[in-house]
Amino acid sequence: MSRPHRLLPVIAVAILAWALAPSALGRSSSPPGHAASSYLVGIGDEQAEMFRNPLWQQLHTRIARYIAPYDAAVHPDSLAKARAWITAAEAQHVQILVAFYHSEHTPTILPGVGQYKHDVQKFVKLFPHVKQYQSWDESNRGNEPRQFSSPSAIASAKYYQALLRVCHKCTVVGLDVLDGNHIGPTLRYISEFKREIRRLQTIMPTVWGLHDYSDLNRMESWRTREISRALGGAIWLTETGGIVQFGGAFPNRHGSGLSRAARVTRYMFAVASSQPRIRRLYIYDWTGGNTRTRFDAGLMDNHFSPRPAYVVVCKALHATRCGLRVSGH
């Protein structure tokens, strides 16, 4: 999703609208019951300051996700950001998942497979302790003219194969898809990806990435279940959680978005417990925005004060100091 501190902060509003617009079908899902299921919980964020925050430290989570441009290793500015984040994470003994994404310098130009392989290989060599990767973040988002481009399912399969070849001992998560209000396009993308994997005679992924914002923020779970079934194998919800604010679709008037995000976050844990395929949750994200932010899902506000959703996460992870005064912003 598009965030204030993420690569190119103003992108993808149109894609977000497609993913999160209220459903005309209105298919409902009652809150799922708990089943025997275990999963790891972590945070996705691109700000190294998170690791120095005592509120993050008390969660004792040991996984975190970072989104890096695929060409970060060849651009000093992108590399400096990635290095700062990875260094801070490694200092806290966190297991890192890196998701590659479009270039910050040429976001509308998709790399050829050879260029992609060359650039990510440099990144992998620079960070030998990182052993978990995603070849492209939210690969099914589509294109936004003059802002960013996303790979086709066929291109995604080739990027996946290239990343496998440069990091033989890594866990490479297969695909990383956004659910969307209507999941038909997502299911077709998955099917086409799998066909190309078979054509390439490449190892079929056993771990898959899913962003289930559209499902959870409607307090529904059927999209997550159906997409997970189509993917197969283990599911990592590589971005998940409650939205505080997204344009007019999910406003934060008088703090309404804060309480809504807390309810969704509580529901997120229930969904994860009810679907045994789900093995990891990467809650996005730690760092919140302000009233002008288009997409805001921060557990903290923009002054790093905790929001109600943080308290939900804190209690779910059995931290010791969850009785906090929460932010109204």
Image (cartoon, grey):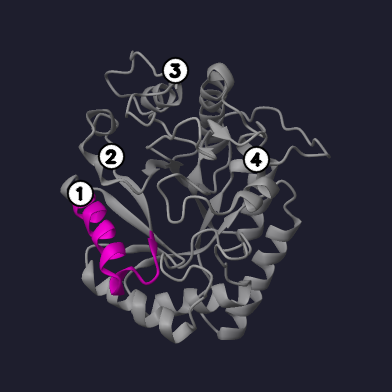
Name which residue lies at 38% across and 17% down: 326
Residue 2 position (above or below residue 70) = above
Mark 3: amino acid: Gly
Give residue 171's position: percent from left, percent from top. Answer: 38, 65
Mark 1: amino acid: Ala
Give residue 185's position: percent from left, percent from top. Answer: 73, 60
Q: Earlier in the sequence, mark 3 or mark 1?
A: 1
Q: Nearer the viewer, residue 325 or 5?
A: 5
Q: Is residue 274 left or right of residue 48?
A: right
Q: Residues within 10 Å of mark 4 (few under 14, many from 20)?
A: many
CA gap between label 4 and label 2 equals 27 Å
Tell me the mark number nearer the camera, choosing from 2 and 3.
3
How many badges with numbers are in the image?
A: 4
Q: Secondary structure at mark 4?
A: helix
Q: Assess whether residue 245 is covered by the magenta stretch.
A: no
Mark 4: amino acid: Asp
The residues colored magenta run 68-90
Mark 3 highlights which residue?
328
Mark 4 highlights which residue?
215
Q: Earlier in the sequence, mark 3 or mark 4?
A: 4
Mark 2: amino acid: Met
Do the residues under discs 2 and 1 have CB atoms within 8 angstroms? yes
Q: Nearer the viewer, residue 157 or 170?
A: 157
Give residue 135's position: percent from left, percent from top. Answer: 45, 68
Name which residue lies at 46% across and 56% down: 8
Mark 1 highlights which residue?
88
CA gap between label 2 and label 1 equals 9 Å
